[in-house]
Amino acid sequence: MKLHRLVLTNYRGITHREIEFPDRGVVVVSGANEIGKSSMIEALDLLLEAKDRSGKKEVKQVKPTHADVGAEITAEISTGPYRFEYRKRFHKRCETALTILAPHREQLTGDEAHERVRAILEETVDTGLWQAHRVLQSTSTAAVDLSGCDALSRALDVAAGEAQSDAAQAQTGTDALLIDRIEAEYLRYFTRTGRPTGEWAAATSRLRAAEEALARSAAAVAEVDDAVRRHAELTDNLGQVAATRAEASKRLAAAQEAAETVAELTRQLKEAELVAAAAEAGHQAAVAAVTERRRLRADIDERAAAIAELQASVTEAADEHDTAAEVAQAAQRAAEEARTALETSRERVEGARQIAQRLADRDEADRLAARLAKIDAAHRDLGRVYTELAEISLTDEHMRAIEAAEGAVERAAAQAELMSARVELTAVGDIEVRVDGEAVGLRAGETWSSSFGARTDIELPGVITARVVPGATAAETRAKLGAAQQVLADALGKAGAADVAAARLLDQRRRELAAERDRLRATAEALTGEDTVDELRARLAELGEPFDLGANGPRDAAQARAELDAASVAYQQAVAQCETHRKVAEEAAKRLGQRALRATALREKLTTVEAEITSARARLADQRAAASDDELTINAETHGEKARRAAALVTELGEELARTAPDVVAATLRDAARQADELATRHDEMADALREVSTQLKVYGTQGRKGQLDEAETEREHAQAEYARVRRRARAAELLRSVITRHRDATRLRYVEPFRTEVERLGRIVFGDTFEVEIDSALRICSRTLSGRTVPYESLSGGAKEQLGIVARLASAALVAKEDTVPVVIDDALGFTDADRLAKMGAVFNAVGGDGQVIVLTCDAQRYAGIAGAEHIELAATA
């Protein structure tokens, strides 16, 4: 298959673009990003695979957004004996047109044209190889899978020595047909992943359904038997429960009579308890009145004694308050004296701190002055380096141009030397010849030789004149050498150097000056730090001129710090003493307040107690006026006698009630009632269950469950026989397929060696003579070996994966037969490849050659500049 022409109209952002591709060799299609290079591959796929009326997402996405028109794709393709022009328009006024140009002219439209192209491609194109020969941006580092490429398999058969006579090839075709028939037979029973399907799945499902139906029928018959058994059991149990229920009713009546007797005694006991409680309450009230009268008399006596004690405490508290007042005044005077001493110490510390700061400022000014001097020296040296660098016109770009021009001159000189005519003269005797008029003397036996890139006359005076005329190729190489030398001279002139050696010396000097410049700049920046020179000078000016500390002042910072430390120690001592006196004064004031508060509280408490005793004496006089102490005592004794008689009656009734055992009577009644209720409930439940079972038996008798069980057993036997028969055929097909697959995989292993040989042949151009690869039976690269070190494919860098992917595709393109070739499409690959590998990859493209097409799509045409003979097509940005 070959792509001769591709035309895109209103496709995505492409208004119109037409590209004609050469029939063979490498074509490099270059253009800026988003200009539509990858869209050409996408458009070719849509043209060959999608119908013009397709509603697929891939078709909708290519509709242009700048105009309400349909996307149009046209391609001219040759494959096998066919050559045709194929066009489709999508979205608007959909159209498909096919013109077959060879082997004989045909014209078709619509779905008929689409189906015709699909048939041609299926007949002549290995679609697996067409898909595998693509290196796309999104999968450029993925391992290429060539296992499904029939064209490559046929080529590897030939390369591995498997190609036989016509009879043998016919046999191979028969083997392929047999494999297909075995695969078809296997797929009758299994899916491609090995799961049961078709007859095997149907037989399995039928057997499973028959066993389930048999289980359901057996369960239904067992359910009938269980119902008959339950009916007999319920009939017997219902008679037993009826007899037990009658006996339980008699026990319940006797328990209810005993419970009524206990209830009457309980009522009488409660009434007696109420009377006894009232009598006890009257007795308690009378006793409380007597107790309150006695408590009031005792309280009056206690308060009289407390008043005498409080009067003595008030006198003592007054004396303590006077003493605390004198102590507080003395502590306050001591605190004032400590504060005065503290202020004197603070002034001494401040003076010592100011002197120490002045000395520190003087030291900082000295450091700043030395730092600024170093910065000024670095700046002077930096200015000198800048001046010398400005005098050198040579740049890195100039040097690269000189090196490249020198390499071009060397290559051109070597090629000119190789292509030039070479003449060797050997003198038999002493002789003199003329070469373009210049005399050349030769002694006997001496040899003279020279190469000539232009026409040259060699004259033997008086004997013969010979003219050496080089071919056109030698003249061209001489012209290229002259052009390369002129480019070198121009590059040296721009750099201001006499020759390449001088340019190298000048470049070395420039690099040394640049290094010194960077060093000086770093030194200046390190000295400056986060500040600027102006800030440093301003800081130095702020520090001012040196000053005099006087005759008695410290002479250096150490003495000033010592004075500051001594003043600080004295200040801390003064602070401690001041704090101590302050705390003492505060404590004395606190104690004075406590003494005053205690004296006030005692006086208030004395007043309160005197008022309380007066009130208590008044209450006692009022109570005695209502009832005397003797009257309260007699009333308490009378109520006590009534309470004792009521308590005796309660005791008598309680003993009589205890003799009736009320707890036992209540428990017996509860048990009898519970048993009666349980038996009634059980009797009702059994009667309901018996009726329900009887109803079920009537329904079961109309369902024919025994007949259903017999039918289920018969179906299970038939399903089991069919399952065994299909299982034998399915297992036989599975075994046959596994055996033939194992032999086919063994045959495929013979493909690996010729493919690996071709991959290593091309790969050694890129990776060197130690390059080896491991290929599996699916023709995938598993690992790469360089210098004896093996690395798995997945562990290689992105650049190495890209390079191996392209090498594998070019190797398969070189192996397949001429009639099976398909274009190799490389979409913006080798982006991870360095300059040296790019040049070697160009040599790989050159080494492939052949009749196939290699289409390279790239945004950087320089990546593929090393491909000799490649045709370059540059896409215009306005296309």
Image (cartoon, helix red, strand yellow):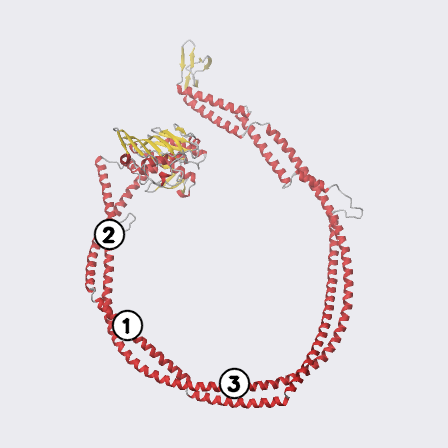
Sequence order check: which comes first, mark 3 or mark 2? Answer: 2
Residue at x 77% of width, y 67% of height = 327
Closest to the camera, between mark 1 and mark 3, is 3
Q: Position of residue 161 (x, y in %)?
A: 28, 36
Which amino acid does the dot numbered 3 rest on? Ala
Number of the label disc, if any, that sits on residue 688: 1
Q: CA separation, marks 1 and 2?
A: 51 Å
In depth, the one of 465 and 266 nearer the eye is 266
Q: Secondary structure at mark 2?
A: helix
Which amino acid does the dot numbered 1 rest on? Asp
On screen, residue 253 above or below 327: below
Q: Residues within 10 Å of mark 2 (few under 14, many from 20)?
A: many
Where does label 2 land, which residue?
Answer: 200
CB contact under 8 Å: marks 3 and 2: no
Where does label 3 land, which residue?
Answer: 277
In depth, the one of 644 and 850 nearer the eye is 644
On screen, residue 364 above or below 480: below
Q: Is residue 72 visible?
A: yes
Q: How many numbered marks are there? A: 3
